[in-house]
Amino acid sequence: MSLLIVGTMAFDALETPFGKVDRIIGGSATYAAWAASNFTQPIKQVSIIGGDFPQEELDALGARGVVFDGVDVIKDGKSFFWSGRYHLDMNTRDSLITDLNVLAQFDPKIPDSYQDCDYVMLGNLVPAVQAKVLDQLKHKPKLVIMDTMNFWMDIAMDELKQVLKRVDLLMVNDGEARQLSGEYSLVKAAKKIQAMGPKYLIIKKGEHGALLFYDGKIFSCPALPLEEVFDPTGAGDTFAGGFIGYLARTDDISFDNMKTAVVVGSAMASFCVEKFGPTRMKELTNEDLVNRMAEFTTLMDVNVEIALIA
Amino acid sequence: MSLLIVGTMAFDALETPFGKVDRIIGGSATYAAWAASNFTQPIKQVSIIGGDFPQEELDALGARGVVFDGVDVIKDGKSFFWSGRYHLDMNTRDSLITDLNVLAQFDPKIPDSYQDCDYVMLGNLVPAVQAKVLDQLKHKPKLVIMDTMNFWMDIAMDELKQVLKRVDLLMVNDGEARQLSGEYSLVKAAKKIQAMGPKYLIIKKGEHGALLFYDGKIFSCPALPLEEVFDPTGAGDTFAGGFIGYLARTDDISFDNMKTAVVVGSAMASFCVEKFGPTRMKELTNEDLVNRMAEFTTLMDVNVEIALIA
C-alpha cells in the first residue's frame, strides 16, 4: 500500500564521542524514507528543501521508490539545518544550532497523486503543519502515525492535543510521554495519552527498547545491545519508517502485526546508529535485515511454560 | 535439587513515595528464600540473626521448606538493620541507617547436612564472607551465583575479584556492571566481566528489565510495566531467588532454561514490588504465578518472520 511521509529533509552537523561531521544529509522524512523503502514503494514524500539539497541525494531516494511531487523546492532558499552534540551516554544531546531556513515557510500541499495513501506518517513538525496535512486528505487513511517532541509540548500543547485527536498512533520517548501525561508511571501515562486520541501508543526508551500499548495490552521490544552506538541521529525516524513501512507492506494493523513492526523499527534503528547520519541505511541489504531479525529472535525467544511445586 | 542460600536476614525501615514502615522483615536471604520456595524445597539457609528475629517469621519460612541449621542465632544480639528512602523514580535510594549488629561477626559455617547442595546463591555480602562459604563446600556445585554491590567495588575490589573467579554467574545492576568493568557499553562491560571469571552474567536494569549474557549470546527480558511500584526493596533478591530456585527445580543450566529462569526471576520481582517488604511474597499462589508468566508471554511474544521487498 502507498505510504505518505511528511517531515524534514535537511542538513545536520553532528558531534558524538566517536567523531564529528560538519554537514551530512538528515531530516526526519529522509531517515524515515530510507527505512520504509526496504518494505514498501512508492513512498510519497511531503517536505520542503532549499536549492542546496543535493540532487544525488534525491536521486538515491528516487531509486528507492521515493517520489517528490509533494516536496517544495525553494531554489534560492537554504534547507533546514540542525547541529547537535551527544553526551557520553548517547541518550542525551545538546542542540547547538537550529536554522529553520526554508522550513519556516513550510505549507505542505498534498498532490492528487498522493490521495491513494492508506498509511500516513506525520514526522516531528509544528503541530499546525501536521494538522494541515490531515486537513487535505480526501479519504481517511487506514493508519495515521505521529511523532512529536517535548519542544511542541512546551510551546504549542493545545495545537498538539488537537492533532492527537486525529491520529491512530503516537510515538514519543519516555520523557515526552511523562511530560504529555503528567504521570511518572508509563502504564498510567499510556492510559492518559490514549484517552487523548491515539488508540495505539509507542513509548521509545532508547537503549532500553520500546513499549507498544493497545487496548489494555502491552508489548515490550528490546533494543539490540550494541558494542558501540556511533551516532544516534535518526534512530527514532528510522524506527518510525521501518514500523510504518512494514505495516504498509503487509497491510495488516492487527496488534500482532504491529508487534512485528515494532521489532522491524527497532532493527532499523539498530542499523542507523552504527554509522554517522544515514550512511548505514543506504548500504542495507535484505541479507542484513534477515540476519538482524534473527538476532532479535535470539534476544527475545524464550519458553515461559514453567514447572511449579504442585 | 537442594539449594543453598547465604545472605542477610534482617529488619528494614522503608520510606517510599507511597508510605513508610518502621520495622519490617528484610534481608537478601529472606527475600531470596521466599521466592525460591515456590520452586524448590528444602532451601538450606546460611545467615546470622539476633534474638530479636521473630520466631513466627522463621516458622513461616520453615513451612516453605527453609531449614536453618546454617543460621547462627546470637540470642543477646540484634539482627542487621537497614533503613532507606526511595526517590520518586524508585530506581534510586538513600541509605539512612545501616546497623550491622550481629552481621559484623558473621562467620558462616556450612553444616554437613548442606553438603549435598548443587545450587548455591551467594547473596550480597562482604566478598571475604562469600569466599568462606565456597571454601567449605566439599564438592563443586553445579551452579554458583553471586550478587554484590557497588559498595564492595569501592572498598574491597581485590577480594571481590577473587570471588568472581570462583563463581559461574554474577548478577549486578547496570551501574555496577559499568563500575566493575570500566566500560559504558553493557556489551563491552559484559565481555570484560566474563573474562574475570563468571561464564554467565545477568545485568539488572530495574524497570527496563534484565540482560543475560552467555557465550556471545544475549537474552533480553523486559520488566513487567506496572501502574505503581510500591516498594522496590527485595526486587533484586527475589529475582535471584526465583532464578536459582527455578534452575534448582528443573536441574537444567542450559542457556535456554536460564532464559526461562530470568523470566521467572522477573516475575518474582514484579510481585515483590507490589507491597511493602516481603508481604506480597508471602501471599503468592501458584495461580498468581501462572497468570503472571502469561502476562510475560503477552509482553514478549512476537513473530519475527518478515516480508521483504525481493
Image (tube, coloured by chain):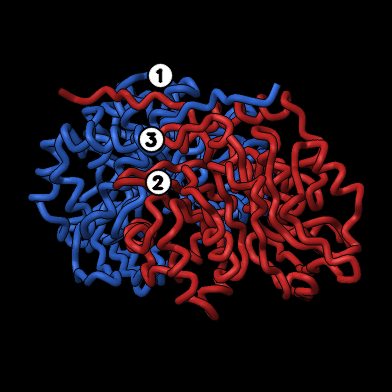
Chain colours: A red, B blue
Give x and y (percent) for residue B87.
39, 71
Which residue is painted at 9% across and 51% down in the image?
Answer: B55
The label on residue A187 is none
Label whose residue precedes the other's in the sequence (1 or 3)? 1
A98 shown above or below B180: below
The quarter of the rendered structure image containing the N terminus of chain A is top right
Return the chain for callout 2.
B
> Badges 2 and 3: C-beta atoms under 8 Å apart?
no
Give amino acid for label 2: Ala
Q: Position of residue B138 (x, y in %)?
A: 42, 24
Considering the numbered disc 3 on the image, is that residue within a helix, a strand or a loop?
Answer: helix
Under mark 1, the amino acid is Asp
Question: Which of labels 1 and 3 is toward the front?
Answer: 3
Q: Secondary structure at mark 1?
A: loop
* Front in this rendered view, residue A217 or B166: A217
Quarter of the rendering containing residue A15: bottom right
Foreground label between 2 and 1: 2
The answer to which of marks 2 and 1 sits earlier in the sequence is: 2
Q: Residue at x 53, y 36 (%)?
A: A247
Mark 3 lies on residue: B263
| Residue that carries the numbered disc 2 in the rendered image | B223
Question: In this view of the protein, which residue sits in the foreground, B129 or B235?
Answer: B235
Same chain? Circles 2 and 1? yes
Q: Residue at x 74, y 58 (%)?
A: A27
**Percent from the top left, x then y, of residue B111?**
29, 32
- Quadrant housing residue B253: top left
Q: Quadrant of the C terminus of chain A?
A: top left
The chain identifier of the residue carrying mark 1 reads: B
Looking at numbered disc 3 in the image, what kind of residue is underneath it? Val
**Which residue is disc 1 drawn over?**
B252
Percent of width and height locating residue A135: 52, 61
Q: Residue at x 61, y 57 (%)?
A: A123
